[in-house]
Image (cartoon, grey):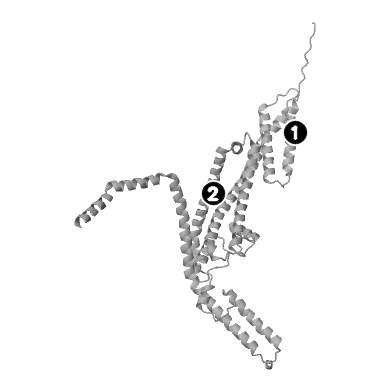
Amino acid sequence: MEEEQQQQLLADKQSCSPSAAKRFFSVFAALGSNQLLRSALSHLGLFSTLVVYTALGGLVFRALERPGEVTRVAEAQNYLWDQRLSFISSVANFNSSSGLNFPDFLRLRLSAYEESICGAVQQGVLHVPRRAPDIQSASEVASWGYLHSIFFASTVLTTIGYGNVAPVTFWGRAFCVAFALVGIPLTLTVIADLGRIIASSLTSLGETLREHLPCVAHLLQATDDGSKQGSLGIFIKSVSFFAAILLLLVYIAAGAALFTFWEDWTFFEGFYFCFITLTTIGFGDLVPKEPDYMLLCTLYILVGLAMTSTIIELVRRQYAQSWKRMKELSARLQSLSGPITDALKRIDLSRASSTIDLTMLHELRDLKKTLTLTQLETKLRFPTSKKNEWQKEMEAAMQEIVQLTSPPKRTVVIYETSV
């Protein structure tokens, strides 16, 4: 028995030997040197932090708000139950000696009972009790359940704020302020990180298509080389822009289809809810109520917000590029206005013997190309808009300038003579 114990101690010492520790640290270092694994762990750690923070916040909200809500709902149910019994008793024991006929008396008592129902609904009572209420029945209709509280915490962090559920206690509201101050920046960081993952995935997809499909590689090359294939490049950029919008609409439609199974909604109601949610408008007229799908709904909203923010950034860049292009064109026109005027004066003074400045002709040709690409870009991005007046005038002016600056035609006559 003692020999077995000694052998076990010797085996433990060998397992804790420096060679074993060295192997452990070498494996750990090899994992740390893997760039892809480190990046995946970084994304996963950031997302897990948000999940844990949201879950803890939901539990704190439930602990702060649920007891008070259950008490309020129980009191409202008892009051409504008493009013119900009073209404039935007064109708059953009606006596005409009160000076009222039965229809007027019934109308008066029914109006008072309806007011008590409205007050109970404001306190959170969802249906008229059919039996004497108790704390258990009040707990069943309380809004601050586990999943509902976590879903409420996610709406706070994403700044959607439907408004159907809100804290009413002092400590609940104070915690909501502190929870949002810390959690909203964390949520925005996670959304930005998910947006980068989506953008990187789309970039990788483009690279894969470039490698395996020659026609796609040619189109992608056109977007990179605007000087050689400017019109085609602008066209592909516009198609990519509309493809991003289409991707967002497909994601919203997929969510709408899911909500038709999860909730008692039509497809349009689901599409409307997804759009209002992913744009963080959050009216609160439609809110998920099935607790079984609350966590999936939260995940869908988080990924959708990342996709929406990414596509909105793409739209912003498209408008910024258009504005930058307009400013560059305006600056180029202003820089060439003086030289063009001088060249026209020289041509007008000595039209017959003037020599045309070839550099100026090249500048005019480049300027016309830039104007043409700008007009094409405007047509592609705004297909229903009409041409602006300045575009028409600029086109006419460029035609006149090119005609005036074209070299004069000379006729050379060669003849033979016997002299």
Secondary structure, mark 1, is helix
Q: Position of residue 392 (x, y in %)?
A: 74, 40
Which one is in front, 241 or 3?
A: 3
Residue 16 appears in the picture as rendered: no
Q: Identify whether 131 is placed above or below 338.
A: below
Q: Where is residue 274 in the image (x, y as percent from the top left)?
A: 60, 58
**From the image, which quarter does the N terminus lie in?**
bottom left
Please tell me which of labels 2 and 1 falls first in the chain: 2
Q: Hey, which quadrant is residue 357 in on the image?
A: top right
Farthest residue toward the bottom? 97
Q: What residue type is labelled 1?
A: Glu
In this view, the residue farthest toward the left is: 2
- Which residue: 63% across, 39% down? 233
Judge by depth and name the residue closer to the eye, 169 or 68.
68
Q: Is residue 343 left or right of residue 187?
A: right
Residue ID at (25%, 51%): 11
Q: In this view, does 384 lie to the left or right of 211?
A: right
Residue hosting label 1: 400
The answer to whether the residue labelled 2 contacts the one labelled 1, judged by CB atoms less than 8 Å apart, is: no
* Cα distance in 3D space between marks 2 and 1: 49 Å
Q: Relative to 321, is 107 above or below?
A: below
Q: How many callouts does the rendering have?
A: 2
Q: Of the residues shown, which amino acid type is indicated by label 2?
A: Ile
For residue 379, the mark is none
What residue is shown with label 2?
198
Label 2 CA crowd tier, 10 Å (few <14, some 14–19, many 20+): some
Identify which residue is drawn at 62% across, 85% down. 88
Q: Position of residue 228 (x, y in %)?
A: 62, 33
Out of 397 and 82, give the one closest to the viewer: 82
Residue 186 visible to an observer of this rendering: yes
**Mark whose residue sits in front, 2 or 1:** 2
Q: In which quarter of the image is the C terminus?
A: top right
